[in-house]
Amino acid sequence: MEILILLFVAVIGTSFLCSVLESVLLSTNISYISVLEKNNPIAGKLLKKLKTDIDKSIASILILNTIANTLGATLIGVQAQNVFGENGTFVMAVSIILTFMILFFAEIIPKTIGAVYWKQLAPYAPRIINFFIFITYPIIIITQFVTKKIGKETTDAISREELIQSTLLSEEEGIIGDLESQIIGNTLKLNSIKIKDILTPRSVVYAIEKNTLIKDIVEDKRTFKFSRVPVYEGNIDNIVGIVLTKKIFKQAITEGEKNLEDIMKPVFSLHHNIHVAKALNMFIQKKEHMFIVHDSYNQTEGIVTLEDCLETLLGLEIMDELDTTADMRKLALNKMKAKRKEKEKAEENNK
């Protein structure tokens, strides 16, 4: 009877330990391992190694767990028959008890413990798992050889959609804030948003002709609304530079009769199909705040600013005390609708 009880404890105990270790290993994330490496270098590095080669780690745990359950159940059955003899009722009762004990004490309870207390157990798990790998290594080699022959190894690539869903889940659980979640989500979408979707259309762009006298520019109240203004020659499709309004005001004090050619600086242009992520990178590299946007026919489609890219990233409109309109694209659309109505009204009056 003592041997039977000992076998029960050995089987359930081994299976319990395997289930806890499996749950801890699967629950541990890379960010926590990085923290553990600093606080406990030995355990952290070993856990990182096991997590990197997780197939081998899981294989060793499953092999040992399977051996414990199958071989242990067989030994318990044989021992039960020796103890109770030909009494089939008691032997059946032992089998039923063993089944329920494995279900609760070797599967449900230990895996729940591992999933809930993985942070507390993570520093102790690596050494035990490493020992499991050592004693089951020959079987692991055989299983890996067979699986490689059956199918090619696949890598777990996380898609952008999965990252976005993970971010939303973290927000729901209170791990990160609403704004942080929004910024992360918008960052992952930057490669799918094009410049033409965020630019200020040419119909509402305020630009100055290159030969306009500075004193005349200062008289235009629109100049006071912007920190920099595009400069064109002939028509707006031929933008030749950008001028800072503070330079215009400074020049107006000293030499108001001069034009913009002396104080404007070169302008860079972008194609309207460039993604926002690339445009943002170009703003940083060139240390500029405004680009001219051209369409496929090299005509000016509008302008895009560093502020536009940041608004896309943050998911909100950035307005200062001089801004009178939040969405210039909406303003351009409203102007087009107004012009269309005026044209239709004029045509009706002519009839």
Image: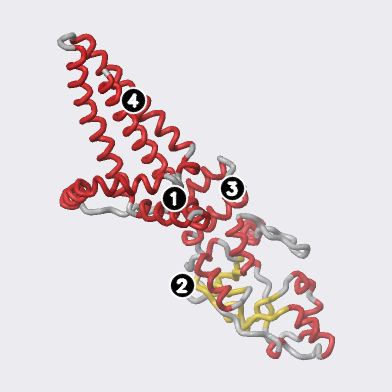
Give residue 223's position: percent from left, percent from top.
76, 74
Q: Nearer the viewer, mark 2 or mark 3?
A: 3
How far is the residue under mark 2 from the one under mark 3?
42 Å
| Residues marked 2 and 3 touching at CB (< 8 Å) | no
Position of 317 relative to 165 (above/below): below
Q: Earlier in the sequence, mark 1 or mark 4?
A: 4
Tag 1: Cα neighbours inside 10 Å, few (<14), some, or many (≥20)? few
Q: Mark 3 points at which residue?
A: 176
Tell me which residue sits at (49%, 72%) in the image. Answer: 271
The residue under the point 74% across, 63% down is: 320
| Residue 70, placed above or below residue 124 | above
Looking at the rendered structure, the kind of residue marked 3 is Ile
The residue tagged 1 is: 161
Q: Which amino acid does label 4 sit on?
A: Leu
Callout 1 amino acid: Glu
Query: Mark 1 vs mark 3: which is more N-terminal?
Result: 1
Choose the circle earlier in sequence order: 4 or 3: 4
- What residue is pinned by disc 2? 296
Q: How far apart are marks 2 and 4 (CA)?
A: 66 Å
Q: Distance between the residues labelled 1 and 4?
A: 36 Å
Query: Taking the image as drawn, is residue 342 in sight?
Result: no
Question: Which element carries disc 2, helix, strand or loop?
Answer: loop
Kindly report the distance in space between the C-alpha atoms of the residues bearing marks 1 and 3.
Answer: 18 Å
Judging by the rendered image, the residue that carries numbered circle 4 is 103
Q: In which quarter of the image is residue 93?
A: top left
